[in-house]
Amino acid sequence: MEQSVRMLARCRTCLPQHRRSPVRMLGMLFAACLMSFKPDRVPLQAQSGGQSTGVIAGVVVNDRSGAPVSDAQVAVEGRNVGATTDAAGRFRLVGLTGSGNVELTIRRIGFQSRTMSAAIGATDVRVGLIERAMELTSVVTTGTAGIAEKRAIGNAVTTVNAAEVVATQPVNSFQELLNGRASGVSITASSGQVGTGSRIRVRGASSLSLSNDPLIYVDGVRVDNTQASGPANQAFGSASISRWNDFSPDDIESIEVIKGPAAATLYGTEASNGVIQIITKKGAAGRPVWNLVARGGTSWVPNWLTRFEDNYGTVPRAGSTTALDTVTISTRQLNDSLNARFGNDIFTTGELQDIQLSLAGGGSTVRYYAGGGYEENRGAERVNRLRRMNLRVNVQANPSPSIDLQTSLGYTSGRTYLPYEAGGGGATWATYYASPSFLYGGVGVSTRAPNNPQLGFRSGPPNIYYQAYDLFQDADRFTTSFQIANRPTSWLNHRLILGIDRLAENNEERTPRNDILGATYASFASSGPPTSGSISASMRDVTVTSYDYVANASFSLTSAFKSVTSAGGQIYMRQSRLRGISGSTFPAAGLTSIASASIRNVGTDELFQNNTVGAFVQQQVVWNDRLFLTGAIRTDDNSAFGTNFDAVTYPKLSASWVVSDEPSLSIPSMFNMLRVRSAYGASGLQPGAFDAIRTYTAAGGFLTPSSAGNPDLGPERSTEFEAGLDAGMWNDRLAIELTYFKGNTKDAILSRQAPPSNGFPGLQLFNAGQVDRNGIEWIVRSTPIRGDRLALDLTLSGSTNHYNIASLGAGTDFVSLSSNVAHRVGYAPGAWWDRRVVSAGYDATTKRATNLMCDDGKGATVACASAPRVFLGNSVPTSEGSFTAGLTLFGNLRINSFLDWRGGYKKLDGNYRVRCGAFVLCRELYYPDEVEDKALLGAVQAGTAYTHHLISDASFMRLRELSATYTLPARFASTLGASRASVTIAGRNLALWTNFPGIEPEASFNGGTRGGAFGQWEQNVLPQLRQFVATVNFNF
Amino acid sequence: MKTMTMKVVTAVLAVLVTAACSGFDRLLSVQTPSRLAEDAYLVPANAALISSSAVADYECALGSYAVASGMAAGELFDATQTAARWSYDRRNILAVDATYSTSNCENIGVFTPINTARYTNDQAVTKLEEWSDAQVPNRQRLIAVNSAMAGFSLILLGEGFCSGTINVGPSLTPAQLFDSAEVRFTKAIAAATAANDAAILNLAYAGRARARINKANRTGAAEDAARVPVAFVYNATSDATVGRRNNRVFQQNNQSFSVTVATAYRTLNDPRVSLTNQNRLASDQVNQLWTQNKFASLTASYPIASGIESQLILAEARGGAEGIAILNALRARTGVALPALTAQETANFNDAVAEERRRELFLQGNRWFDVRRFNPALVPTTGTAYAKGGVYGDQRCWPLPDAELLANPNTRG
């Protein structure tokens, strides 16, 4: 693989000079994989049976983005000649007699039809199609009984045109692709380490105690949706790897997002957090089209030399045996010391290399898409890197007009190396919490002697961390689906989807034996005697199996009314096996296997199985193809329901009315399309596999209480009503999608600390609460300028949500999740609650704040020792949105900018907490006279007792992407042997606006003890990287 | 074409029929190989396992308590870099703190492991009493050992906490908890006598003596302590390969460098407090690393009760010259060979007993309650700045945690 990567990398740089040969080599590689497909080698499919006397050839592109448009119908007016564009957007009309101009008509779903004139003999015709801002005929497969047109669906469905985004934007992962492009979907980034993931929420977080992770489907098959995995590179859940990013953006055609229970009813239990479906690329009929994309990029931590606070500390005064001086240490000083000792900076410049190659084509009965790629990405910390290989083969076949077969096979394999951060230590820990006192003393050295090998860094210089630890995750994932659709009669169609998602994950944390490090640095004691190194490996194997059958029967009741009856059933089986083994004390340096460790330990061997069986019936009545009324019932049973709890049933109702198709209504002429829609429905969320039963677990040959269980436990039930309208105005120059939702979660499962005196440790789940919610989502698209030389399109998308706990069960109105995060009736779930110091006196002699008085929650103050916890703010964003502006110049230069924001929440600045409260490094503690706000001083001087002063508004707006794509003129492209070629230069994370006083608003724990559903918290997390990427994209 | 359609319909129907025939109920049954449901566990065939598992719960709780209470009592300094455990060391545990209330025994929790041990030992006794001798071999012996462990669990609860609870019941004072412990030791004595098991009998007497002296019942304490031979020791067992079964003091102090022996013990020059100065910093890079030599490895056993502790109780209960003679006898024993206490040292008898106890019972989980009982000056004094942030508090017992208060309706008003 390494060999071929170098080959691929060379290809990117040498392409202009030595055209085609490396590409051909790659082509041969892939052709070898694709021998069985034997695609139709006739380059263009002409539908004319006539003689080739005259030709018109060209390309159909998206007028806005310049991306090729496949499957467009090109017809010559008045003549029986036509063609369909291939995957590169190319068409070729043959058999045209005569000379002069003819009129071409170009049609494609999702675009406005276009008529233009072209000269017979022209072979470089460029047709720009204008995308419809609001398209009701496009089909949706998510949350529907089979495939449905958008016009028939009463709930909002957000579609992200992934292929178009990936073609021009600096998008390296699935989550970056989704970020800001689907209203109501909020993505909270965790760390700037490459390979790490974000936390995704759809319409906020409504479950008090269960996962708020949406479900994810790939081509109709449910797949593992874990958002935080990886080696335990720290204790709090930062820098975790999201399984969502296993899906290569280059293989994705589109993403459909359905939000909330009204839309997700047909997915039943588990679906109330929304469903996100990935639809992978499929082949288009036509000649085989090769697509080669190569990316090269660079990334870094912006302003890292000046971005982190200086730290204070005391050091021995020269010539004295007791006196101390207060001095500071800065990142620049640390970096200079590091350079002098090790010859490198604290942070480095990352590199991205990515090459993706695909082949798409086929004939009328078989179409194929085969793609693959290899990515290497190095981060701003030297050991942070990933390499990943992905392959995909999708084949569609129509063995007969009534049968569609579709297989979709995806495989990805890679390794991600992560450095320590947050509670685990690492370069950020060493730097953010450096202290001048670490310039003095050392292991076995008097504390007043200088030359500490730590060089002022906490625990040790970053290089020592990299030398001492080796942490990585290997992940192999195979996702496949097979779908057969059949139309036995004109009124009946049915389809069956079978699928498997198989994941094998290996997480390793290695501390090789290193006696020198162990003896030199106190914090690296475990790498030398007495433990002499250690290793921990945890394996996670997940298999998700899906069976999904749906049948639809449609009848015309009258000339105006049509009935569609649907029924179906699903079986989802999920099995996770977790195994952890560890060892310590290697007899000699160089040995790092568990077998060579002197002490070996099997830590974990857990099997989690969870199965759902469900069925639904749906009835739809259609009136004149413009009014759609739908009702459905779904029933589910799940293996995790308590023994006293049986199946659960969810209803759904929806209505969609295309008002603009209504001849009897006179709507203003500015509307070229207007639809109103509404949906009501329910779905649920199941508890975990062991939540219902009381269990014991074994350790060392003995059993000990494990889970208290609750035999009455049932699923949460979420109900939602949503209403909205879709409008296309002024000939699609302006389009608006607006949705209001209101709903609640009943029987909300609440995880409460079981009283320890009942003998069972940990938490116990109850169906106890109710959470109400409402919100608004919008997308506004406009094309204020639409010309051949200049086109401008703008998109504003966003959402707000409001959550309120209506009940926490009888006798309780407050449930504490941690010392500063709690659920309280009348407030949003998981909000910040802690004591707040509002005033304090000051003793100028002791230089300490005195007589701390806290907010009593009733408008007065009370001594802090007996003060209640008061509301400090929400911990989950209540608004998010994005603004995209795209400018197309001369049809071939596209400039795109993309801003996104999150707001209405607060985040805990753990760096301030650790610097002041734990490690006594902040200026306030050394110069208390300077601190005017003595209440703040009191909180700071109290160590870690208070957190209110750390919790601040973390709303932010970021210039996420800015890109320029230049599509080479066809004649240049053809000299390179390409039918189309484009070059993109793009930047990511270029500017940030925020009130957050800490280092980075987009740094937070994604799981672990301080992450998960609520309470955004960070502590020495690597900031988001700024990145520049150059992309070349060729079609052959 | 029709044939093709028929084939597809047949295939789909076949899949559906197969799925239906396989029984959806079976699809919903799942395996739980790593956890045993309670009804499968609590059966007579598992009696010996139920008994020994409950003992293991206590052993782990005791190991964790020895470290946590060692920090609170000034035997150990915390040497970790993260703040979660500092409040043990700083003597300012808050009821909301998680580590002391809900952490397990590997992570130096105390309230939950002690309560679990109390519960599983009580449960074992209840089940053993339900079952017959025919079902369970050595039933009386098992009843004796689990009754004694339930008693010791209650002793730790009463010694460590300002108040405690049993089975989601009301808040109990330490004296009430010691009463409950005494009831269990009495049951253990009866069962051990019936089983004719001298070791468990001694264990139960040593436990009851401790419960009694804790309540200042000197007569009762002396009576029980006198029955325990000086050489008696009842040890907890350890294991290196299972984290939960490690010798916790060794693991925390000598292996992970997460605690260091406190300054007050470093220069005692007493074989009962044998230490090594590692001449390096501990994991927090603040404290010098001093390691204990009492427990030599992760597998070292550690005492649950001993004749030496009983002798100390006896000395305390008897007092006066008799008490001093007992203390001197302990000091003179082989392997210790310390001179007799001077008149100056015995001028205040309580101080002498407390001092001998702090050395003899070093890192065995006894000092924390002695800090409350004998009321010595706190070291470092309250208000002193804690090197890693904050100041030292004045606690001599831990508050009943919020984890219990908020979830247990019987503890409210």
Image (spheres, coloured by chain):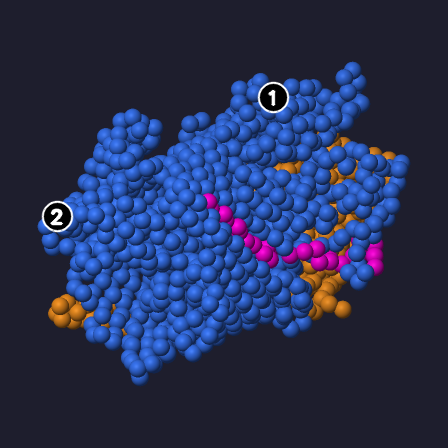
Give the residue pinned by disc 1.
Answer: A336
Disc 2 secondary structure class: loop
Disc 1 secondary structure class: helix
Q: Quadrant of the C terminus of chain B?
A: bottom right
User: Is residue A225 depicted above or below A9 in this figure?
Assistant: below
Who's the residue at 81% across and 39% down the image? A931
Who's the residue at 69% across and 59% down the image? B402
Read off the magenta span. A860-887
Chain B painted colour: orange
Q: Amino acid at mark 1?
A: Asp
Who's the residue at 51% across and 28% down the image? A348
Q: Amino acid at mark 2?
A: Ser
Residue A307 is covered by the magenta coloring: no
Query: Would you call the spot at circle 2 few (<14 residues within 10 Å), some (14-19), or many (20 or more)?
Result: few
Residues under labels 1 and 2: Cα distance?
Answer: 73 Å
Give the residue pinned by disc 2.
Answer: A52
Query: Would you call the spot at circle 1 few (<14 residues within 10 Å), some (14-19), or many (20 or more)?
Result: some
Q: Number of marks in the image?
A: 2
What's the chain of the residue with tag 2? A
What's the chain of the residue with tag 1? A
Residue A880 is covered by the magenta coloring: yes
Residue A355: image location, x then y, percent? 34, 37
Who's the residue at 56% across and 34% down the image? A302
Farthest-out residue, front:
A100
Residue A159: image location, x then y, percent? 42, 58
Chain A painted colour: blue
